[in-house]
Image (tube, rainbow, N blue to C red):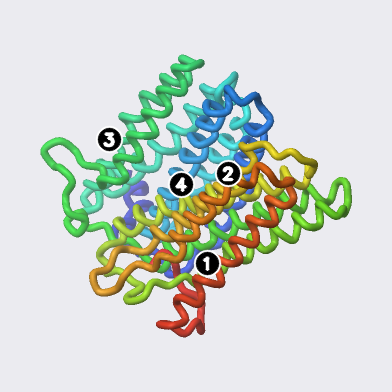
Amino acid sequence: MLRRAEFFRGLGDSRSPRSATVLELLFDIVYVFALARLAGRVGDDLTIVRHTLLSEAGQTVLFFTAMWMIWSLNALLASTYDPRRPDLQVVLLATMFGTLVLAVTLPQAFGQRGVVFACTYVVIQVGRPLFLSFALRGHAGHAFALRVLTWHLASSVLWISGGISGGLGRGIFWTLALAIEMVGAATTYPLPRLGPRQIDSLRVTVSQEHLAERYNQFFMIALAEVVLEAGAAVSFPGFSTEGTITLVASFVAVVSFWRMYFYHVRSGHASTPSGEGIQLSRWASYSLLLIVGGIICTAVGFGQVIEDPHPPIDWALVAIIFGGPVLFLIGRSTLERASRSAPRCRVLYLGAVALAVAAPVMVLLPPVAVAAVAALMLAAITVFDQRAHRRVHRLGSESNPTL
């Protein structure tokens, strides 16, 4: 018993380093595979009959959000306590293996592997706060760990019920379970009689520098998915006129995403007080959810055009190609916190509107032309965005989007 106490001693008072650790980068390797599987599901959704498209797309969104919840809470844990500690490294490795199992079961999660998916997800989401509840006994952070544990225990009943029930019931149970987790995260996991206490009273300090670096790294991993999808689609049949044009368009989209993500700086203050770490993580988490989702849609859209460049183009593919950048622009815009002293930049919002307005007309064009137009519009939005900020700021260095 004494050895166990020694093993966990000092966890609550440990502080996360400003930079991500090598183990956290290793953890992201699993998400390279997971994002590829999710992109594969999106591609499969485009090949099914249209009357089942909504349900299939809903399943993909559910899986994507569930996987994102695991990653974001893992990043929050490593940004709160020192991930170089042996006990936290065990937790990170266990979560990494569980995430690998989830990624493997994704194709059949609504089929024969539903119970495996649900049980693995519950073990990850309940096991992490359970560990903290045990390790932080006697520390001020223990109360917050209990809050998180209680909410995930409530959602775990629905996850397991959905895995057992199957069919339509599985989708309903899992949607409700995921909704509970997202509401809990958005409200700082309130409990009866305790209520949503103020962040400062929870005595949980989050390293903004570490959290921002983790989100930036995950963004780069998602961005690589565009290159992976387009490059893989071109490499098998070899270069062709249509494939080359779409490959160039995907490269333009990658550069535009990168430029707008790292160099879009709001006029005024670009940082928040250090006491708002948990609020920052919640704000950035939901924004990055849209950003990464938009990038995956864009990657799949360009890949599909390379594989089948012949007209006519399907309306669902147009929705993916143009909807992906719209999600990205909305997510990137919402990363900026409202400021009373400086107005929010509207270039990205206007760009999202322009893409949405142009999308219906694209069904009249060949698929290659649709991809090219989407890339050119992204490039134009990037140029206008940089010009808008050049009037106020000098772009001498990269900005940190999550700060």
**Label 4 amino acid?**
Val
User: Residue 228, how many percent across, how many down?
Assistant: 71, 52
Q: In terms of image quadrants, where is residue 15?
A: bottom left
The residue that mark 1 highlights is 260
The residue that mark 4 highlights is 91
Q: Secondary structure at mark 2?
A: helix
Residue lying furthest left:
193
The residue that mark 3 highlights is 150
- Do the residues bearing badges 3 and 4 touch, measured as CB atoms within 8 Å? no
- Do the residues bearing badges 2 and 1 touch, measured as CB atoms within 8 Å? no
**Distance in Å between CA atoms under marks 2 and 1:** 25 Å
- Do the residues bearing badges 1 and 4 touch, measured as CB atoms within 8 Å? no
**Label 1 amino acid?**
Met
**Distance in Å between CA atoms under marks 1 and 4:** 34 Å
Determine whether 248 is above or below 61 in the image: below
Residue 358 appears anywhere in the view: yes
- Badge 2 crowding class, 10 Å Cα cut-off, few under 14, some 14 to 19, many 20 or more, is few
Q: Secondary structure at mark 4?
A: helix
User: Residue 63, how many percent across, how many down?
Assistant: 51, 35
Q: Residue at x 74, y 38 (%)?
A: 312
Q: Which one is in front in this view, the residue at disc 3 or the one at disc 1?
A: 1
Q: Which mark is residue 360?
A: 2
Mark 3 or 1 closer to N-term? Answer: 3
- Do the residues bearing badges 2 and 4 touch, measured as CB atoms within 8 Å? no
Q: Residue at x 35, y 40 (%)?
A: 182
Determine whether 185 is above or below 284 in the image: above
Q: Secondary structure at mark 3?
A: helix
Left-right relation of 46 to 147: right
Instruction: Work out whether residue 281 or residue 95 is closer to the camera in this orientation and state it.
Output: 281
- Badge 3 crowding class, 10 Å Cα cut-off, few under 14, some 14 to 19, many 20 or more, is some
Left-right relation of 193 to 43: left
Q: Which one is in front in this view, the residue at disc 2 or the one at disc 3?
A: 2
